[in-house]
Amino acid sequence: MTTSAGTAGALELFGKISDACAAILAVNEDWGLSGERDTQYSVDLLVDAACVPLLLAAGYSVLSEESGLQHPPSGTTSQGVVVVDPLDGSTNASLGLPWCNTALCLVEEGVPTVAMVTNLVTGERFTAVRGLGATRDGVPISVGAPVPLSEAIIAGNGVPSHRWGWRQFRAMGAAALDICTVAGGGFDGYVDMTPGEHGVWDYIAGLLIVEEAGGIAVDAFGRELVVVDPHALRAPVVASNRELLDELLAARLADE
């Protein structure tokens, strides 16, 4: 696993990459589609090009939403795989909404170890190192006090068939930031209400951050969330506490 020096190096590199992505987004005026993949914007490819070469040059393998799984010139590496979503919430960004991010997570031997999620508009940055907790802009964070579903504010992806009994619901359009907001004591939970349309890049950085902040996350159907597979789709359910997670899972499965 990553040493303390390796962790610092990964975080420094992740920060450099996130800053480069923010700079690209700040001056972007082209919101046309790339034509290479449904819903992919041209700017998605620009930010991907700011992420992948730097990660490969540092000796990591890379799994990116935009360009798939790649290895450094030396081939597969013992340094692990960085899973990256270069621009999560690109439709929000196209609308001028400040809810979009770059998400990076180092996975070593099947274990997420270092993660960073940066809001590309506001600059707010969440980080986590396995076993060392989570931070927002360098300040330690933790999930909110436990509440039942009836008092909870839940974020989600997709549309439920009915109200689940929550206090309020939000569909914000950028899973990593939604999950990090649970980690920071904002939302009480997050649910993918679709049959399962999240790739691992959508949630894995947020997964480590929320777990290090004291939260809990599972797949709605009991599948492994930590995968390095560009074709695997999951339905993450996240909560600040086990009791709320159980309520969300029960409601989620009843909604099928």
Image: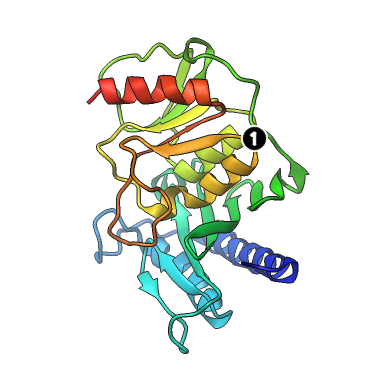
**Residue displayed at 67% across by 63% down:** 11
Picture layout, residue 206 above or below residue 243: below
**Residue displayed at 50% across by 47% down:** 100
Q: Quadrant of the N terminus?
A: bottom right
Picture layout, residue 256 above or below residue 58: above
| Mark 1 neighbour class, 10 Å CA radius: few under 14, some 14 to 19, many 20 or more | many
Q: Give the side of residue 246 with respect to residue 7, left or right.
A: left
**Residue displayed at 58% across by 41% down:** 211
Query: Residue 183, how many percent across, how many down?
Result: 61, 36
Q: Find the residue positioned furthest to the right.
A: 139
Q: Disc 1 marks which amino acid?
A: Gly
Disc 1 is placed on an element classified as: loop
Q: Quadrant of the C terminus?
A: top left
Question: Tell me, what colour scheme is on the image?
Answer: rainbow
Q: Nearer the viewer, residue 115 or 17?
A: 115
Q: Which residue is mark 1?
A: 184
The tally of labels here is 1
Query: Residue 35, how many percent across, how many down?
Result: 24, 64
Picture layout, residue 100 above or below residue 33: above
Query: Residue 148, how many percent across, how many down?
Result: 52, 14
Q: Give the side of residue 58 with respect to residue 254, left or right.
A: right
Q: Give the side of residue 142 with respect to residue 80, left or right.
A: right
Is residue 150 among the parts visible in the rendering?
A: yes
Is residue 123 among the parts visible in the rendering?
A: no
Q: Nearer the viewer, residue 95 or 60?
A: 60
Query: Residue 122, how many percent across, how many down?
Result: 63, 46
